[in-house]
Image: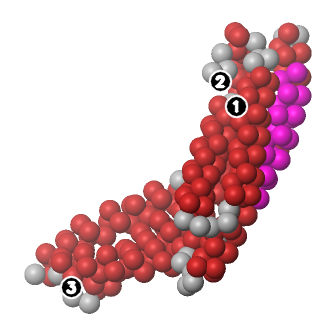
């Protein structure tokens, strides 16, 4: 009986713990820092901060589920009680993870009363607007740095000081840069849609929607500008962006 119970414990808890590792490991954006400019590194740091906030709830839920299942197993529970403990722990852990993540973004928890709820929605929108402004600032810096770097690389390439492989290596983060910006454009579109829905329910958010639309337009323009910068790379380099 004991062996059977331990088997159930391992069978249930192992995937949960593996899931924890997968969720928490997703906050790292791949790339070689030695080839990145300061703006590229800053862009990835902003992305990682944004991802960590979003994953706070998910991570908390997974850890809570693991803890609930483990507690049920240690107290002699069968397979059913282990599963029940995991569900309960997941709910509690999800709440705890959400509270932790919302030290940055407190607008996600439910507020009592309509006016309190509106204030929370507006505070959350202001947080998002500030995030996209910072992202636009970093992207503007990135465009300037990449433009200068490509100019120098083109000169070195023509002079035979760098070959194709070295040129590509130094710009290995180019595709990742555009991918991050694309992700932020998609995210701001979702935020605008969500905020418009709140406005239809009576929340006074029209000015915030307009500000988010402005930041989205800036991101789109800057993405186009970055693509133009990368178009200066010689075709035979095959940068792939």
Identity of the residue drawn at 37% across and 79% down: 89
In terms of secondary structure, where does tag 3 sit?
loop
Marks 2 and 3, how far apart at CA: 55 Å
In front of the other: 203 or 232: 203
Viewport quadrant of the N terminus: bottom left
Identity of the residue drawn at 20% across and 72% down: 8
Counting residues from the N terminus, which is met first, the one under dot 1 or under dot 2?
Answer: 1
Q: Is residue 173 above or below residue 237?
A: below
Counting residues from the N terminus, which is met first, the one under dot 2 or under dot 3?
Answer: 3
- The answer to the question of whether label 1 and label 2 lie on touching residues, with beta carbons closer than 8 A, is yes
**Residue 190, x across and y down, in percent:** 57, 50
- The residue under label 2 is 241
Q: Is residue 89 above or below residue 178?
A: below
Question: Which segment is the magenta one?
Answer: 130-151
**Residue 9, x across and y down, in percent:** 25, 74
**Residue 98, x across and y down, in percent:** 54, 73
User: Horizontally, is 37 left or right of 79 in the view?
Assistant: right
Q: Which mark is drawn over residue 77?
A: 3
């Amino acid at each position: 009986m004991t062996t059977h119970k331990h088997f159930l414990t391992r069978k249930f808890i192992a995937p949960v713990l593996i899931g924890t590792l997968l969720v928490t490991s997703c906050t790292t954006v791949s790339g070689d820092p030695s080839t990145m400019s300061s703006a590229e590194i800053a862009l990835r740091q902003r992305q990682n901060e944004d991802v960590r906030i979003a994953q706070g709830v998910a991570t908390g839920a997974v850890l809570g589920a693991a803890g609930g299942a483990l507690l049920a197993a240690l107290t002699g529970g069968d397979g059913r009680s282990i599963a029940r403990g995991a569900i309960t722990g997941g709910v509690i852990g999800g709440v705890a993870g959400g509270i932790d993540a919302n030290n940055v973004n407190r607008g996600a928890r439910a507020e009592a009363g309509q006016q309190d709820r509106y204030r929370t929605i507006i505070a959350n929108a202001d947080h998002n607007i500030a995030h996209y402004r910072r992202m636009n600032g970093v992207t503007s810096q990135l465009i300037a740095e990449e433009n200068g770097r490509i100019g120098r690389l083109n000169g070195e390439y023509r002079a035979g000081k760098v070959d194709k492989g070295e040129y590509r290596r130094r710009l290995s983060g180019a595709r990742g840069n555009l991918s991050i910006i694309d992700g932020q454009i998609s995210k701001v579109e979702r935020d605008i849609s969500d905020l418009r829905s709140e406005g239809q329910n009576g929340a006074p958010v029209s000015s915030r929607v307009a500000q988010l639309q402005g930041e989205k337009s800036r991101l789109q323009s800057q993405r186009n500008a970055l693509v133009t910068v990368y178009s200066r790379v010689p075709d035979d380099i095959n940068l792939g962006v």
